[in-house]
Image (cartoon, grey):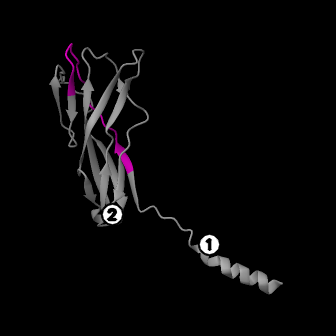
Amino acid sequence: MKEKILLLLLFFLPFVSSLIAQVPISISKNTDMNFGTIAASSVGGTVVLSASGSRFATGGIILPSINGIVCAAQFTVTGEPGYTYAITLPTDFTLYESGVSLASMVVNAFTSTPSATGTLAGGTQNVLVGAKLNVGASQAAGSYTNVLGFTVVVNYN
């Protein structure tokens, strides 16, 4: 009886060793996106934040000289050195006023540097992400955010 048990254990060992998982690529957030301080008027418009962190306004939006914190989102992609990867950005995202007005603004037209693909030279690469903030006519004053955050996905090519 002991010989049969030993043979069964040897038979199952190769199957146990094949259950190894590896996550070959990852992304982590370094910096949140911030459009800074803006002033809305009775005419709506947009604030475009480039992946490099510069911004400009269209329509009735004014960018005050005291602009607050303005920065593109920054992520670090880590994986196998020399591999290329694809970047998937969200199509749109909603920010909500944190006070009592419950107003919102939509963020869309996301861009990144690198744009559609990147290469993991040395096993890491930073990805910068900008977008367009759509500001309504007479947009309610307040601090707009979304604690859920937006998702950037990377996959090996």
Answer whether residue 42 is magenta in the image: yes
Tell us which disc is closer to us: 2 or 1: 1
Answer whether residue 85 is magenta in the image: no
Please tell me which residue is depicted at 40% across the width and 31% down the height of the picture.
Answer: 146
Please tell me which residue is depicted at 21% across the width and 15% down the height of the picture.
Answer: 41
Q: Mark 2 and 1 residues: CB-CB less than 8 Å, in contact?
A: no
Q: Position of residue 94 (x, y in %)?
A: 36, 30
Q: Of residues 111 and 68, which is closer to you in this image?
A: 111
Which corner quadrant holds the C terminus? bottom left
Q: Position of residue 124 (x, y in %)?
A: 32, 59
Say which residue label 1 marks.
16
Which three-letter amino acid code belongs to the residue tagged 1? Val
| Secondary structure at numbered mark 2 | helix
Say which residue label 2 marks.
123
Are there few (<14), some (14-19), or many (20+) residues within 10 Å of tag 1? few
Quarter-of-image position of residue 72:
top left
Are there few (<14), some (14-19), or many (20+) residues within 10 Å of tag 2? some
Which corner quadrant holds the N terminus? bottom right
Residues drawn in magenta: 28-46
Q: Of residues 98 and 137, which is closer to you in this image?
A: 137
Looking at the picture, does residue 89 appear above or below residue 94?
below
Q: Position of residue 112 (x, y in %)?
A: 25, 46
| Secondary structure at numbered mark 1 | helix
CA distance separating discs 2 and 1: 30 Å
Q: Earlier in the sequence, mark 2 or mark 1?
A: 1
Which three-letter amino acid code belongs to the residue tagged 2? Gly
Quarter-of-image position of residue 11:
bottom right
Farthest bottom residue? 3
